[in-house]
Structures are given as C-alpha cells and as structure tokens.
Image: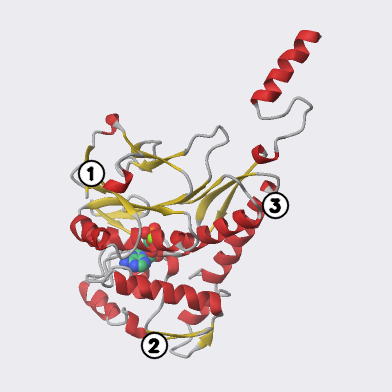
Amino acid sequence: MKRITAVLMAVLMITGLTACGEADPDKARESIQVIAMDTPMVFTAYGEKSTHAVYMAEDEARRLDALLSRTDENSVIYQLNHADGLGITVGEEVCGLIEAAEAYSQATGGAFDISIAPVVSAWGFTTDRYRVPDEAELAELLTHVGSEHITTAEDAAALDPGTQIDLGGIAKGYASDRVVAIFRENNVPRGKAELGGNILVMGDKPDGTPWRVGVQDPAKPDEEAYAAILTLEDAFIVTSGSYQRYFEENGKRYHHIIDPATGHPADSGLTSVTVVADSAEGNGTMCDALSTALFVMGEERALDFWRSGTYDFELVLVTEDGRVVVTDGLKDILTEVEESGYTYEIVS
Ligand code: AMP
Ligand code: MG
C-alpha cells in the first residue's frame, strides 16, 4: 500500500500535479478540435483559464466564419458581393479587414488580391464543382479584378458591378490574430492554435522547451512528412501551398492560389511558402496575406520582397525542383529533414 502511494505520488509529480494533488495552474491544459471556416482547427491552451480560452477561441472562429463566408447567404461578405454595385454597411471590423487586404495587395504589386473572387469561382473552388475555364471567360472576369473596383469608408463598402471579394487568403490569419488576443486576455501562459495551415505558438511548452512546428512536405500532403522543422516560441507560422487544395483534369493539376496577372493557378516554381513572424497581434493576418502573395510571386520576387524589409518576417520556400530555401533569420531554429530528399539553402 505504501509503495503504491509512493508510485502514485511520483506519477502525479511527473504529470505536473503537486504532492497534495492540486494542479499547477500554469500546466492545466485544455485542447479542442473544431471545424470552422471549412478548416479543421485545434486550440490548445494552458493556465487557469485554459478551458474558457479555448471555447472563446472556438466561438470567435465561428463568428468570423458567419461574418466572412462567401457562400453563406447571411454573411456580410455574401451581401456585399450581391449588392449590385450599391454600398452597404459592413461594420468597422470587416471594413478594416478589407482595407488591410488592400494594403497587402498594393505592397505585393497585386499578387494578393481579394477581388480575385470571380476567377476563383470560375475554377470551381468556391463550390467544389471544379472546371477549367477558357481564356475568353478568364479575360472577361479579370476586367473586374483590381483594387480600383473596391471602395470602403469607415463601416461601409461598395464593389463595382461584376466585382466580388474572397477573404479566403486572409481570414484564417485574421482569426489567429483574434485567438492570440483571446489567449492573452485570459492570461494563457502557453498555447497553440492550428487553423489549417495557419499556426500560432504562444510561450514555450510545459517542459520549458520551444514548440516544434513541421513544414509539411508538399510532395507528401497526406502523410506526416516534413520538409523542415522549426523550433520556436511566440510566433505565427503560416503556409500556403499548391498541395492544400487542387483538382486534376486530363492529367494536369490545378490548385487554388490564382495569379491575378493571368487568371490561372500560379505557376511560380514553388510548391509551398511558409511565412514566420513574431506573435504580435496583426502578424497573423500579415503572414496569411503574404504566404498567398509570395506563392504567386515565386522565389526570386519573394526573396526580393523579403530583402526590401517592407514587413518583418522570415521565409521557408519549397521549390518544385526539390530545394528548401530558408531566410537567414531562421537558420538557427530550422532543422533539416534528411529523409525528405530536399537540399537546403540559407539566403541573406
Ligand atoms: P491561402 O490558403 O491563405 O494561400 O489562401 C488561398 C485562398 O485565397 C484561395 O482558396 C482563394 O479563396 C483565395 N485566393 C486565391 N488566390 C488569391 C490571390 N492571388 N489573392 C488573394 N486571395 C486569393
Ligand atoms: Mg493566405
């Protein structure tokens, strides 16, 4: 009996419980899995208010889904897209998000463009009814694409007739910014949020070591296979890749990131772009917009953009020809994966 008690005590201590059976508040853990914004999400938080924090994160993801969805007829974005050129009240939050998207569009020379929506739909990505549109159709749709077709003012917005917007390239990043705010409001000392390819890590792991986040190997999308592993704390890690959503027709693969210059899936020589930045609120949105934009821009333009210093972030690019290109701010926290077969390059 005495021995069993001793063993039990040891187990309790190892699992983070004190000898008198009280949980260490910083190690209380809650983790939930939800599907929102068409995406599997995992929210994990530690601390006394961890349970409240993860359920608030879930509520927030669902609120944003209902607000920003393109397909839900009750969403503000649906109503704006179907307002036939009239201005409508969208609220300050949505207005701010559209304006942020516009700023990223301008900064990336139009590589990121939420008004790409009609083209995304023409390829069937909005409805999952995939098809290859012909050039005449794409050319007509592209006449409605561009910042000049979007007007915002405080809490209202208007789109030119024929223009629609799709916040799919930025909404999960914005949601992850809201999650970091919710976690902070609830004094979460450490936690992790995974919103599809948008990952947030807060603090360190309970054992005091940094989080390890794998960059998915785009060549093996259905396996637990990584092109690289990042070891870090308090960061957003956001990946856009051609492996994340695509269809095949006549042996050709068509993915969901569209080059606004051509109306076709971006053919930039990259298979994925991972953008890493510190966990300051706002950086989740930035990483999401930039991962999409830099995928469109390709290796050379993406690295030039990184070197320009317009925004503070680091990059992991995976190329079609089997290279992993890493910006030098990540060199000490990146682990190569030998069995992946990639070659690694650090750039400055
Ligand atoms: P992400 O997974 O963040 O790279 O976003 C991809 C999604 O953003 C697509 O499924 C579309 O809804 C939308 N999208 C596609 N191409 C673009 C683009 N060039 N700029 C902005 N959004 C885009
Ligand atoms: Mg994105």
Q: Amino acid at mark 1?
A: Ile
Q: Amino acid at mark 2?
A: Pro
Give the residue at x 32% y 82%: 144
Q: Earlier in the sequence, mark 1 or mark 2?
A: 2
User: In the drawing, what numbered circle is on residue 144?
Assistant: none
Given contact means CB atoms under 8 Å apart, are the residues at marks 3 and 2 in contact?
Answer: no
Figure quadrant of the N terminus: top right
Secondary structure, mark 1, is strand
Q: Which residue is mark 1?
A: 346
156 up-or-down from 39: above or below: below
Secondary structure, mark 3, is helix
Give the residue at x 41% y 75%: 165
Q: CA distance from mark 1 to mark 2?
A: 46 Å
Relative placement, left or right, of 33 versus 335 is: right
User: In the drawing, what numbered circle is on residue 161?
Assistant: 2
Q: Which residue is mark 3?
A: 52
Looking at the rendered image, the disc whose residue lies closer to the viewer, 3 or 1, is 1
Question: Looking at the image, how many numbered discs can be counted on the residues?
Answer: 3
Relative placement, left or right, of 135 versus 24 is: left
Residue sitting farthest toward the right: 1
Relative placement, left or right, of 30 versus 137 is: right
